[in-house]
Every structure is written in C-alpha cells, then in structure tokens.
Image (tube, grey):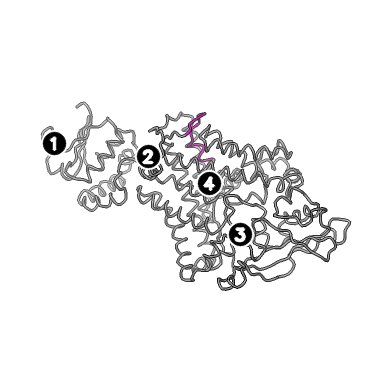
C-alpha cells in the first residue's frame, strides 16, 4: 500500500463534512475514499462495519472509530490526540464511547454541526482577524501615548503635580537598590523632563508603525517598554486597569506579530500559541470582571440594582448615559443581569466551535459598545474589542468586509517559527499561565494559593506580565464632586474650570474617549476619600498657587491670568442627574447640593493659613 487509506460513508453529509476537515489537516499523507466506491478494494472488511465507523488501513493494519480518526490526524502532525489515546486508558474508553454515540445519532449531530460550525467545517484561519487585531491594538497604543502628549508636563514634569524626578529620588532614598525592582522604568537612567517627552513621543511613533504595518513586532515591544516605564513612574495618574491591560496585551501580541521590516496590508496566519494566549487574556478580562462583582458581596449587583446608580456615578458619563439613567427600573434590573451573564457566561463560549465562539465575542463587543456610549473610559473599550476580533475567522471577516471592497494579499501560512522563538513563546506561556491561574485562585479561594505562587506573583507584579481585572466590583451610590476655587483676598472666590468632569449644571455630559483626561478622572477618585489620603491632591493645589503652566494646561480655564491666587480651597457637592421634567424647566443636566468644605483654605508659606 502506497499510502494510508481512510474509508468513510460517502452517502452521509455528516461524514463528508468532517472528512473534508481531516483532509485539510492530513494533507496528502492520507487517501480518503468513500467505501461505496472503494469497497471492492477491501472485500475483507464487512459492509456493516463500514457503515457504522470509519476504517483506516495503513502499514500497521486496520483500525476503526476514534483510533482511526486520531491516527489519520497524526499523519498531519496533529499527534497529541493519538498520544493521549494510546497512553491513557480512560481517554481511550471515553473517546470510543463518544464516537459510538455520535455514529448512532448522525442525523442529530449533523444538525448540531451546522448550528455550531455553519457551512465552514474545515480548520479555521485567523489571518485577517490577526491583521485587524494588530491595527486596533496599534490604535489603542496611539490613543494611550497621544493623550499623554498634552498631559505629561502637568502630571509628571518638574513643575507638574507628581514630578517623576522627586518620586524616584524618594523611592531610592527609602528602599535603596530594591527601588529599581519596585519601579522598573527607563526613567532611572534619564530623569529629565526631556526624557519623559521622548518616551511619550517615541511611543506614539511606535504605535503608528504598528498601524501601518512597519516592523510590527519590534515596534509593539518597544511601545510596551516605553509605556511600562511611564506606568512604573506615573504613580496615581497611570494606575488604571486599562493601562495594565494595554501592557499585558502588547506583551502577548509581540509573540504573534511578524518581526519583519515591512508588511503593510499583507496578511498572514498568526502563531496559534500566541493567539490562544490572547484569547485566554480575553477570558480572564471578562470572567474576572464579573466574578469580582459577585465575590465583593455588593448587594446592588446581587439584587440587580447596580445600574440604578452606575450611569450617574461613573467618573465621566456621556449625555447618552443621562438618557440611560432615565430608564424604567425593570429595564435597569434586566440590564444589570445581562451584564453579569455576559461577563460570567460568554467567556466560556471562547472554547466552543466557531459559531458559538463568534456569538460570545459579539456579545462582548455589544457590551463594550454600550459602555463606550454611556461613559468615557479612554481606550479601554477599543482594546477589549480588539481582543474579541481574534474570535472571528477569515470566512466571516472576509465575507463581511466584501461590502467595502477591501482587497488584501493573503499569505496562507506564516513562515516557520525558529526553535528559539518556540522555546521563548512556550516558556512565557507557561509563566503567564501560572501567574494568571494563581491570580484567579486568589479570587476564588485565597487559602488554597501556595505561598510560593503568592510570592512569585508579588515579585513579578511590577512588570505587569499578568494581572487581574475587576472594574466596578462595588457600586458607588452617590456622586460627589470637588469644586476648586482661588482667591486674591480670601473673600471673593473664583472657580477653576475642568475640561471634562461635571461642574456647571447646564453643561451636557460629553464624549471625550478615546482620549483620557487623567486629572479629571483622578478628581472622581479624590471625592471618594478625604483629601489627606490623596497626596497628589495637595500637590495639585500647591501648583495652582504657584501658577504652574503645565498644570494649568490640564484645566479648561484659569481665572487668574495675571498672577496666581494667594489662596485656594476645595468645596464638596453631591451631584445628581436631573429628571426629564427638571431638565425641560431649567435646561440643566445636573442638580447639586452643597455638602461642605473638602479641603480648608490653603496658601503658600508666608501667607495667612500657609501650608
């Protein structure tokens, strides 16, 4: 016999469909023939056996059922199922039992196959999905770095709120050499403001190279290094979950993107191991986001009333969020239940066949779009959607984009990966998997987490290789806003206007994403605690008293154009959305109630009430 031969039932649609998939995997190594046409070549095989199970005839003899399938796949270098079949008796028994069940109910499983796989049962390709994912991640990096172009001087410059130079000096003074591990940043080498600008502008350039397909692998790794350096030195203003998600996504994507100078608009199949890692990251992002809401014990998530408060208490709502908050309570309860179902349920669909996987990803994208419409979360929604794109195979995406007549030059397979790259990918995958699993264990059963894994996670946490996620685990039920005022004489006070956070009652909540105003966001967090627990807040007031140009550029307007004020203070208000009836009468989107002083009157040393 020249080559192995697999005999199957040519009259069975279910059998023909799966044989077409196996042909793609085994290539030319196996000959596939319908037994109705080749029965005369194998008269020794009873017809009844040919009807109930596939038969493989090769140099080792004849086998049938699950063993025949696994040996066929092994000829196509997919050998792990056959290895498990031969080494694990229970796996062999289980597979043969499942095969007999399917073979005796082929009509039902044929319908199930169409439901789960659709018309494409062959092995899916993700070249186009990987290309779209790369462009979206490049855009996420662009928006992350690009937003900092307008903010870094006021946040971390020499005259900023939290100067990086002072932070690193204090860290080194307190921790010694350990400071380098606690805050791994390139800013240790160059602490000048010019280097911060270099990191921001350099990262922006790297993101554009990724978008236009130029040196994508090196560019995303360099962008990760620059952004990681900023996160390590950025303190409160770069501590958001999407900052960490951007780093984790970029690091995993660096194993998937090609390391060639110019790819442009050509597409190629991604490395399966790297794509699977990114899908696990997507699973972790959504599942942990839902899990923390349940484990936190917050009654508003457990009784589905969280959205009674969310739209008006989130940091930067939009005008669509105002309308969403007016929804009937029954609708808000159903919406909260749907959020939990999507976050806790759909991640498991990522491990199902193509149609179920795409359904799960579509629901995740739908949730992200709703979040983006009702609130401003910077580049977070774009980044989450980019991970979801990896669930859509080329059959779906290419047919979808035909409406726009986009033409791409596809490369069917990526160039073979070198042995060293394979070792690096699988070694990193093992480390990433251990860290992610330990973090999930810490959420579900903290006592079950070995001390060694806890120490490993703590030691590597500054690198942000793997992180846990869980936004809005506890719902904020009241919205407090801080109004900052300055005065020349301590009697007449003028408001400092912020660019995006709610302040004036008639200003409509607006869209600012994917740009993230870091100071406006931190003002929301400051209102949740006394100002003494937010060291940056006092530093912010000092910069206003000094008239720092960088800090003032973070604000919408400066009421003290000639000279800085002698005094500043912060007042505390509770804000609520108006009702439609109130808005018709007053034209206001907000109503507020004065709660008292948030921070007492402050002045520079030498003035009354000096600090």
255 in the magenta segment: yes
Q: State the SS at label 2.
A: loop
Question: In the displayed structure, does residue 584 sit left or right of residue 335?
Answer: right
Q: Which residue is mark 1?
A: 37
Front residue of 41/159: it is: 159
Rounded to the nearest angstrom, the CA distance separating label 2 from label 1 is: 32 Å
Q: Quadrant of residue 29?
A: top left
Are the residues flagged by discs 2 and 3 in contact, CB closer than 8 Å?
Answer: no
- Label for residue 154? none
Give the spatial CA distance, label 1 vs label 3.
69 Å
How far from the left and from the top, in percent, is residue 438?
52, 49
Q: Which residue is mark 2?
A: 125
As drawn, is 293 to the left or to the right of 341?
right
Compared across the picture, whether 352 is left or right of 436 comes to left
**Magenta span covers which residues?**
251-264
Q: Find out whether the residues at labels 2 and 1 contact each other: C-beta distance under 8 Å.
A: no
Residue 611 visible in the displayed image: no
Q: Earlier in the sequence, mark 4 or mark 2?
A: 2
Residue position for label 3: 315
Seen at 15% across and 38% down, the residue is 35
Q: Which residue is mark 4?
A: 435
* Upstream in sequence: badge 4 or badge 3: 3
Front residue (pair 237, 147): 147
Q: Quadrant of the N terminus?
A: top left
| Local secondary structure at mark 4 | helix
Q: Residue at x 89, y 56 (%)?
A: 606
């Amino acid at each position: 016999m020249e080559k192995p031969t697999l005999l199957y039932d040519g009259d069975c649609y279910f059998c023909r469909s799966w044989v077409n998939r196996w042909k793609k995997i085994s290539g030319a190594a196996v000959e596939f023939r319908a037994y109705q046409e080749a029965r005369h070549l194998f008269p020794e095989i009873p017809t009844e056996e040919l009807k109930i199970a596939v038969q493989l005839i090769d140099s080792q003899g004849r086998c049938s059922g699950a063993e025949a399938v696994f040996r066929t796949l092994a000829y196509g270098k997919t050998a792990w199922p056959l290895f498990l079949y031969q080494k694990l008796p229970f796996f062999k028994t289980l597979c043969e039992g499942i095969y007999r069940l399917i073979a005796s109910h082929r009509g039902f499983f044929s319908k199930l196959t169409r439901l789960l796989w659709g018309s494409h049962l062959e092995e899916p390709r993700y070249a186009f999905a990987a290309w779209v994912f790369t462009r979206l991640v490049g855009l996420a990096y662009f928006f992350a770095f690009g937003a900092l172009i307008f903010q870094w001087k006021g946040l971390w410059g020499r005259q900023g709120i939290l100067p990086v130079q002072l932070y690193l000096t204090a860290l080194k003074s307190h921790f010694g050499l350990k400071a380098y591990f606690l805050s791994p940043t390139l800013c240790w080498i160059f602490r000048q403001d010019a280097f911060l600008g270099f990191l921001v502008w350099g990262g922006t350039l790297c993101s554009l190279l990724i978008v236009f397909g130029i040196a994508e692998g090196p560019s995303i790794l360099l962008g990760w290094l620059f952004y990681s350096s900023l996160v390590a030195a950025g303190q409160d203003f770069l501590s958001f979950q999407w900052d960490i998600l951007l780093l984790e996504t970029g690091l995993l994507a660096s194993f998937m993107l090609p390391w060639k100078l110019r790819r442009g608009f050509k597409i190629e199949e991604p490395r399966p191991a790297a794509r699977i890692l990114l899908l696990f990251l997507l699973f972790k992002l959504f599942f942990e986001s839902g899990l923390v809401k349940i484990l936190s014990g917050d009654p508003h998530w457990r009784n589905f009333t969280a959205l009674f408060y969310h739209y008006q208490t989130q940091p930067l709502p939009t005008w669509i969020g105002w309308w969403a908050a007016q929804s009937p309570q029954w609708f808000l309860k159903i919406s909260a239940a749907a959020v939990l179902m999507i976050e806790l349920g759909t991640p498991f669909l990522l491990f199902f066949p193509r149609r179920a996987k795409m359904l799960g990803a579509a629901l995740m994208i739908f949730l992200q779009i709703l979040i983006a419409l009702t609130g401003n979360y910077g580049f977070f929604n774009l980044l989450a959607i980019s991970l979801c794109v990896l669930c859509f195979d080329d059959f779906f995406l290419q047919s979808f984009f035909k409406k726009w007549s986009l033409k791409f030059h596809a490369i069917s397979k990526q160039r073979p990966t070198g042995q060293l790259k394979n070792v690096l990918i699988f070694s990193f995958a093992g480390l990433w998997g251990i860290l992610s699993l330990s973090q999930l264990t810490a959420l579900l059963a903290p006592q079950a987490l070995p001390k060694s894994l806890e120490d490993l996670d703590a030691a590597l946490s500054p690198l942000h290789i793997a992180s846990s996620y869980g936004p809005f685990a506890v719902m904020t039920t009241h919205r407090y806003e801080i109004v900052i005022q300055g005065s020349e004489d301590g009697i007449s006070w003028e408001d400092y206007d912020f660019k995006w956070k709610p302040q004036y009652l008639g200003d409509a909540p607006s869209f600012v994403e994917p740009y993230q105003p870091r100071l406006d966001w931190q003002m929301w967090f400051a209102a949740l605690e006394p100002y003494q627990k937010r060291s940056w807040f006092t530093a912010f007031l000092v910069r206003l008293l000094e008239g720092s140009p960088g800090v003032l550029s973070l604000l919408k307007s400066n009421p003290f154009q000639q000279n800085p004020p002698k005094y500043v203070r912060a007042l505390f208000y509770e804000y609520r959305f108006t009702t439609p009836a109130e808005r018709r009468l007053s034209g206001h989107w907000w109503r507020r109630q004065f709660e008292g002083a948030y921070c007492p009157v402050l002045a520079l040393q030498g003035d009354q009430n000096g600090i």
